[in-house]
Structure formats: C-alpha cells, structure tokens
Amino acid sequence: MPVPASAPRAVVIGGGIGGLTAAAALHHDGWAVTVLERAAALEPVGAGIALAPNAQRALDTFGAGDAVRALSAWQSDGGLRLPGGRWLSRTDGEAAAARFGGPVALVHRADLAALLAARLPDGSVRTGAPAALADPGGAGRPARVTTPGGDLEAELVVAADGIHSATRAVLFPGHPAPRYTGATVWRFVVPAPGAPFTPHETWGRGRIWGTVPLPGGRVYVYAQANAPRRAASPGGEHAQLRRLFGDWHHPVPDLLDTVDPAAILRNDVHAMTAPLPAHHRGRVAVVGDAAHAMPPNIGQGGCQAVEDAVVLAHVLAGCGDDVTAALEEYTRLRLPRTTAVVRRAERVARLTRLSSPAACALRAVAVTTADRLGPRTVLRSLDGVADWCPPTRPPRSTPVA
C-alpha cells in the first residue's frame, strides 16, 4: 500500500541486505522510502547468508521473519574438521537452537534481497542509480543526496553503501578506512554432490573451507586463505582453489569439479579496527558494513546489518520531527554492541589465519578439548550475540503494508 504524500521521506544509499532491510522496516512504519543502488540489479551475488536467531527476531519486527524462514535451509548438526577429514568438534543443532531461541537459517542472498524488495511499493528501488551525499542535514534542514537524475531531499538518509562507503568518508573524513585483514575469501553456490556430507567448516594452515546446504538441492561454499592484498591468482580463481583445497576431504574435490569458474566470487576481507565515533551525523544513519565492517568468521556481518536496520526504525517510530535526537539514540544502542561483535569476530579470524604447524596443532588441541567439555562450552562463544532480541515497543494498530 502506498504511503501518504505527507509521510516523512527516507533515502537509502545502497541496495544490499542492510539497505533493503532498513527500507522495508521504515516503510512498515509509514516512511516514504527510496532506495538508490549503484549496480544494475539487486544482489546478483551467487552466495549464501546465514541468519542467526538474532537476525530472524529482528526481521520479525516488521513481519518478514516467517517469510525468510520459509525460503531457508536450516543449520543443524555439523562441526569443525581438519583437511584430512578428522572431526575436531561436532555442533549440536538442537542445543544451539535451545540456547539461542532457534536454528540458523541459511538463505541465498538473491532470494533474501528479492523478498525484502517485494515488501516495498513499486518504484521504491532504483537500480543503476549511483548517489552521493551532498548535505547531511541537521535539526533545521533536510539531508540532500545527489543523483544523475537530480537531487533528492529527505528527512533521513541511510548510508548502506558497504565496506568502502563513500558516504562514511564524507561524514567522518578523518577516520581510518577499513583495513585489509590479510585474508581473502571465495564464495560460490553449486548443486549438492551425489554423495551425502555433513555440513562443516574445515581449518587448515592459514586456510578454511565451509560447505553448508541451501534450499533446492544447492550448496553454499566459502573458502578463505592468507594472501597479500589484491594478490593475483595464476590461471584464475578456480585454479587457485584447486591448488589450495583440491586434496582436502570429501566433498571438497567434488564441489570444485562441479563449479563453473565464472561463478566464483573473490573478495579481500576488510575490517573496521577503529570504531566510528558515532553511527550517525546530522540526518544520516550509517548501517551494516559501512558502519562496522567485520571478518566473516562468526557469521554476523549480515546479521548486524539487519539488527542496525530494525533498531533504526525503532528509534524513529513516533519521533515526530526530532530525527536528529532519534539518531543519537540509534548510536547509543548500536555503537557499543557492534564494536563488541567486531572484536569477537576479529579474535576468531586471528585463529583461522594461524599457519605455523605448531600453532595449528595447539589450536586443534584447544578445539578438541572444548568439544569434550560439551556443547555449552563451544556455544558460549556466541552468548550475547545470537541471543539478542530487538527493542520492544507498543504494537501498531494500523501497520503500513
């Protein structure tokens, strides 16, 4: 249902998961939303995303949680392995669901993007639409965004333009940019192999490989390796993956045989080692990787973007004309939490990047010992993260469709 002409205006820069979630949550609360995405299409990314229970509860706040669960696969039992196949630890899916309020939902990013975009009125999302922040606005004036089609003014701008956010650089020009962590990642989606396998993450010397199910008989694969920044892969990314992982346990070789080399995505991993001084300035809120880029090693990058989006909508609900005060509350709620999650992800990432034989042997002993102490010991690493619940507010009597 279209929003009234008198509705407050929001412009979202970036049509990734964080930007689309913010747009859907704001629209649900009565905002007139425009999403500006530089790319020609929304999330044409051949990769999966794991939505932990904290992100699912966030999506529930505007009615999208059940729809996401319906198109997902579920992370159940699995575990951590060595390249030769030996299990270091096993994941108890039931114990994790009981501890955190549900299982992890595994979704194809393109499916999630389409679901979120479908919750917006026609014409709300503009692809092939680069945008730049011209004025962050303030208590007495709207924010202004420049586009090739002309300037847009709004009571709110959401900066969801990713790790290398140009908007963040405008708002905080002296702040250090995300740094390269020393690792690069590859991702792809392929049909499930014929022989069955148990979902797993495998840790080698400075390398990891993950294989997890997606709906429709598909498998999401991610791999990581220590590498210089922007390092070339002689013979292409497929050849590089074969060199790094081709002799690892089943189903790794089968998956490498199946994948179309053109479908392999590669990205260097960057992280915000220095937290921003705030997650807003003027009438602009910064969400997701633009605010707190983190290593992917605890599966919380996308989840924290979803959290950002719904907390932003929460503080803006009923704020009237005082958007700037609401954004101060947004920073108060999000900055400490995301800083803590980034630091936790960095600690795990440092473990995955260990490469000396002695350090990797000690790591294996530590993981095996923790596993023998029971699932609670392993799951404790996500306490305070996956069990997060969104802020509560009085139920809406007439929600915006």
Image: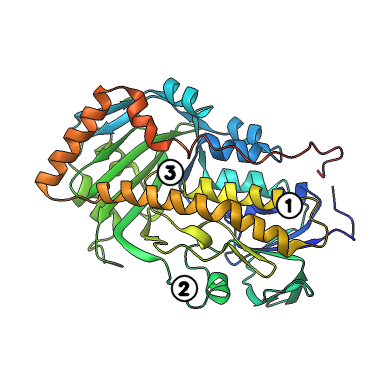
Residue at image coords 78%, 52%: 121
Residue at image coords 29%, 57%: 183
Q: Amino acid at mark 2?
A: His
Q: Is residue 247 above or below residue 150?
A: above
Mark sitting earlier along the chain (2/1): 1
Kindly report which numbered mark, 3 or 2, lies closer to the viewer in this rendering: 2
The percent position of residue 385, horizontal first and vertical second, equals 48, 40
Residues under labels 3 and 1: Cα distance?
25 Å
Mark sitting earlier along the chain (3/1): 1
Q: Which label is found at residue 175?
A: 2
Q: Is residue 331 above or below residue 253?
A: below
The percent position of residue 194, horizontal first and vertical second, equals 34, 28
The percent position of residue 224, horizontal first and vertical second, equals 30, 50
Residue on which disc 3 sits = 299
Specify whether residue 286 is in view.
yes
Q: Amino acid at mark 3?
A: Gly
Residue at image coords 20%, 50%: 354
Q: Are marks 3 and 2 in contact (CB under 8 Å)?
A: no
Mark sitting earlier along the chain (3/2): 2
Residue on which disc 1 sits = 26
Q: Is residue 359 above or below residue 195?
A: below
- Could you say whether the residue bearing mark 2 is in a helix, strand or loop? loop
Q: Are marks 2 and 1 in contact (CB under 8 Å)?
A: no
Kindly report which numbered mark, 2 or 1, lies closer to the viewer in this rendering: 2
| Total marks placed | 3
Question: The C terminus is located in which quarter?
Answer: top right
Q: Is residue 165 above or below residue 339?
A: below
The percent position of residue 29, horizontal first and vertical second, equals 78, 48
